[in-house]
Amino acid sequence: MTSHWRKGIVVPASAAAIRRAADILRDGGLVALPTETVYGLAADAARGRAVACIFEVKGRPSFNPLICHVTGREMASRCVEIPSVADRLIDAFWPGPLTLVLPKRPDAPVSDLVGAGLETLAVRAPAHATARQLLFALGRPLAAPSANRSGRISPTTARHVAEDLGEDVDLILDGGACAVGLESTIVGVDAGDGLTLLRPGGVTAEDIAEVAGAPVAPACEGGITAPGQMASHYAPRSGLRLNVRSPGPDDVMIGFGDVPGAFSLSPEGDLVEAAADLFATLREADALAQRRGGDIAVAPIPERGLGVAINDRLRRAAAPR
Ligand code: TXA
Ligand code: MG
């Protein structure tokens, strides 16, 4: 009975609704779910196209990296390296509103789009019973930003999500008002176990420093507005040119639509497919261009829908450095 589960419907987070939500996620759909901080807009983290749909629905003009939600340490350890200081923080604060940015494992079962092509991945185990039940039902990590349109306020009730995203979401699980009501604290852990506060939140820097037995550095003087967004994070080793239709002999061409290439982001000109494959394709094209000693050349991408975020990413990659 599909009418029973029409798109954008808000349903109480019963066992049946959670099973239905897991099915939707397995099929590549989007589910809004309560966490103890704010409502999240979730996709199966392994499905690049579903993750691309998150960016499309949010209407973000750029790909900021998303948090990978997990059941706990075991699921996190499939995705990231966990140094001992992170282990102590996990023991003390998970499940709960602490996100850790850790080195991504090469074999992480997560689309490159979740980490926006970075070498690190943000992981957190939410405490809300509904989020946990859904993660256990799916058995895989969920990529989820806050369930609001870009530039709007983060939602703390299912009604907020319905008002903001409505029918662009396959199902909205209602688990009541969020207890914390403020996004999670984000802490970066570097190779030397150094800790950096990337976003303040419910878990304070003092609590974290006490458990870690080490100081927590502020992100930078004057604060950081969009962690993970620095241009340096986005640099391939090879030069990159945009809006190319006829590549030079040493160029590695990334095509789109009717412009062909050694790679194509989407021969059909589908922007969702292009976004889903963007970071993996850039990586492969970069490796090939390094071997050839040429540049990466990218076909024109239309500046609409997800094309805006794709072009933002490509311009950062092309920026002189
Ligand atoms: O409480 C929360 O964290 C909520 C709920 C839904 O879990 N989620 C949330 O997600 O606030 P979002 O996408 O709105 O914010 C995630 C933040 C962004 O500022 C992003 O730049 C940062 O996390 N981030 C994610 N991965 C990162 C990485 N690898 N390095 C640095 N920053 C990262
Ligand atoms: Mg947000």
Image: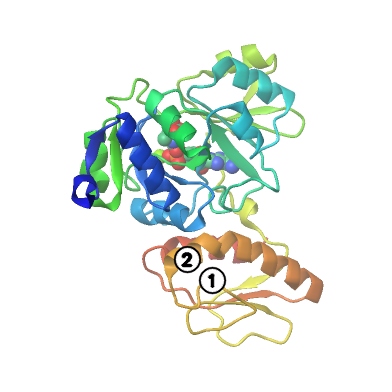
Q: Is residue 111 above or below residue 306?
A: above
Q: Is residue 226 visible in the rendered structure shown here?
A: no
Question: Residue 1: x and y, percent?
Answer: 22, 49
Q: Are marks 1 and 2 in contact (CB under 8 Å)?
A: yes
Question: Residue 72: x and y, percent?
Answer: 57, 27
Question: Residue 163: x and y, percent?
Answer: 20, 42
Indicate which disc residue 273 carries.
Answer: 2
Q: Is residue 236 above or below residue 115?
A: below
Binning the other alpha carbons within 10 Å of mark 2 as few (below 14), some (14 to 19) or many (20 upward) gives some
- Distance between the alpha carbons at the discs numbered 1 and 2: 7 Å
Q: Is 211 displayed left or right of 268 in the figure?
A: right
Q: Is residue 301 above or below residue 190?
A: below
Q: Amino acid at mark 2?
A: Glu
Give the structural element (helix, strand or loop) at label 2: helix
Q: Amino acid at mark 1?
A: Leu
Say whether disc 1 or disc 2 marks the residue closer to the N-terminus: 1
Give the structural element (helix, strand or loop) at label 1: loop
- Nearest the viewer among 196 and 252 is 252
Q: Is residue 318 above or below residue 211?
A: below
Indicate which disc residue 39 carries.
Answer: none
Q: Residue furthest toward the top?
A: 210
Residue at label 1? 265
Q: Residue furthest toward the front?
A: 1
Question: Residue 161: x and y, percent?
Answer: 27, 40
Binning the other alpha carbons within 10 Å of mark 1 as few (below 14), some (14 to 19) or many (20 upward) gives many
Seen at 55% across and 18% down, the residue is 93
